[in-house]
Image: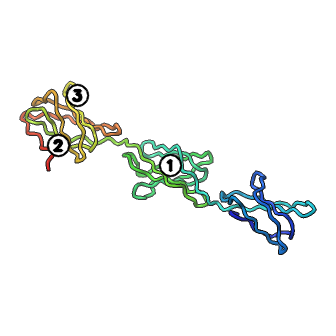
Amino acid sequence: AGSQVSGRGEAGTTVQVRDGAGNILATGTVGADGTFVIALAPAVTDGSTLQVTLTDAAGNVSQSGSVTSADLLPPAQPTELALADGVTFTGRGEPGATVQVRNAAGTLIGTGIVGADGLFSITLAPAQANGEALDVRLVDAAGNTSAPLQFDAPDITPPGAVSNIVVGADGLALSGRGEPGATVEVRDANGTVIGTGVVGANGTFLIDLNPAAQPGEQLSLVQTDPSGNASVALEYDVPLTTAPVSPSNLA
């Protein structure tokens, strides 16, 4: 079944096609050659079972025959997606469908089956914990695939510690390298913030310090990415003899 139901029966009898709830979907008449073809509008393409009966001129009704429609309908996209610790991927979808999760390169990194309750929980390998874009799809038993859904893995990976720290000769500026887009915070030995700045796209930063850092003073530097993940603190001792800050805005 799909767009039509065909079969054989007693010539002249009336054919009735019903859905699983008993609703009449279409009727027709068996031809003189004992065959019938009945159009279904709209087409039935959800894999459901239809019941077909014949009724003769005297009103006698045959036992019903059944025909299963082809399942051509893709499942809906999964919902309520969540990823814990970059590993356990959960959500809701069509019961019995297969969940497929692929990374940006198209590699399958996780698969599982949606339970009878419509829920699924699958393990991703390798873990996805740094804002990766994942492709999530459901494939039903008939091979129909849902429209692709992009899920962005939460960024729970802290950046590494800043590096290449240089304090200017006057102690008023500090430069270094870090994760592009991260915010760098500089604290003195008392824990007071004396300077902040953002790492540029080229991975470098230049921060004004107030008050100026003193030779021999210990500074603590932490960079925090846009997702709120903070690096371990870098404890930096200002040299007794300071060097010029690295040049910037070079062209």
Query: In front: mark 3 or mark 1?
Result: 3
Of marks 2 and 1, which one's residue comes earlier in the chain?
1
Picture residue at 70% right of the left edge, 59% below the top? 41
Q: Is residue 52 above or below residue 242?
A: below
Colour approach in the figure = rainbow
- Outermost residue toward the left in this view: 241
Q: Amino acid at mark 3?
A: Val
In the picture provided, is 1 more to the left or to the right than 169?
right
Q: Is residue 46 above or below residue 216?
A: below
- Whole-percent x, y for residue 239 in the image: 10, 35
Amino acid on which the number 2 mark rests in the picture? Asn
Q: What is the distance, in whole Å, between disc 3 and disc 2 at their CAs?
A: 20 Å
Residue closest to the eye, 93 or 61: 61
Mark 2 residue element: strand
| 174 on left or right of 62 | left
The answer to whether any part of residue 110 appears in the image is no
Mark 2 is surrounded, within 10 Å at the Cα level, by few (under 14), some (14 to 19) or many (20 or more) other residues, namely few
Please state the horizontal and vertical placement of residue 32, each as a whole percent of the image: 85, 73
Q: CA distance from mark 2 to mark 1?
A: 41 Å
Check whether the beta carbons of the residues at disc 3 and disc 2 lie within 8 A of each other: no
Q: Which residue is mark 2?
A: 164
Of callouts 3 and 1, which one flags the residue occurring earlier in the amino acid sequence? Answer: 1
Q: Which residue is mark 1?
A: 122
